[in-house]
Image (cartoon, rainbow, N blue to C red):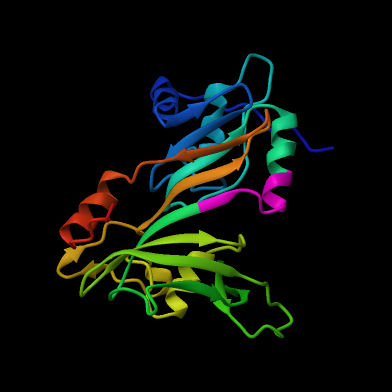
Amino acid sequence: MRKAAQPVVLTPEETAFVQGLVIHEDAELLALAKPPGLSSQGGRRGANTLDELLWAFAKPGKARPRLIHRLDRDTSGVILAAKTQPAAGFLGKAMMARRIRKTYRAIVTPGAPAPAAGVIDAPLRREAIGREAYMRVCPPDHPDAEGAVTRYRTLAAGSTAALVELEPQTGRMHQLRVHLASIGRPIAGDARYGGSLVVAGQPVPRLMLHAHALAFPHPAGGLKRIVAEVPSDFQALASRLGLAERG
């Protein structure tokens, strides 16, 4: 049997902070707009992760809501948590069956991908370098190959950067980051996979990847789509680079 997580005592400031991240709540689930710099789980010592901050929503004597998926620490955007065990089971099965559709925004360099829209179908394998884990594109017949597919389309482009929309069809670690780097368009701010830290003289504050929307079957029935607005640091860089999204 899975050991229950021990309650985490939060400060009033931490409680107010995580409550301010909520963009949707109902009887079965929470959706939050995770800011960049906040680990989903297993983060740095001395700072609570989003998983731990969810104790702010626990009822007396009961478990906290449970994260259904993760986002990288520097990725912003919508993330789901189940408030009940049945909802967690339902959403977990939906995730495994690839019935949860994820849509991301990214700023890539040095311009629009060619072609401007398409599919990246490139298997990935995990590689350990010291204590760090990386993902690498590899041949399909590699013994450690994991299938990975990403759909993309260009929303706006300039001479130095482009704003792209991404829909991962699989859920491999660092998939979007490695796939874009593999076609010569790494995500701005992604030092691990070759992303620029300065674009057209503009400093890049972080990994420019944002989980914009989730569409999924709701545990209570029907379909639900939740959008997390692009945060100010992402929007500011896009504006300075002339990457206004066309309507």
Q: Tell me where residue 44 appears, x and y as whole percent.
A: 48, 48
Camera sees residue 40? no
Q: Is residue 204 left or right of residue 222?
A: left
Q: Tell me where residue 136 appears, x and y as whole percent.
A: 56, 77
Return the residue nearer the eye: 115 or 45. 115
In the rendered picture of this protein, how many numbered marks are placed on residues?
0
Camera sees residue 227? yes
Q: Quadrant of the N terminus?
A: top right
Would you place residue 2 above or below residue 69 in this image?
above
At 23% from the left and 60% from the top, the residue drawn is: 243
**Which residue is situated farthest in the top direction here?**
60
Q: Is residue 199 magenta?
A: no
Find residue 142 and report its image quarter.
bottom right
Q: Is residue 51 left or right of residue 162?
A: right
At 68% from the left and 72% from the top, the residue drawn is: 146
Q: Tell me where residue 229 appears, x and y as whole percent.
A: 35, 42
Find residue 169 and report its image quarter.
bottom right
Return the residue nearer the eye: 51 or 245. 245
**Which residue is situated farthest in the front direction here?**
247
Q: Where are the magenta residues, as a range?
A: 93-102
Q: Tell me where residue 26 appears, x and y as whole percent.
A: 57, 23
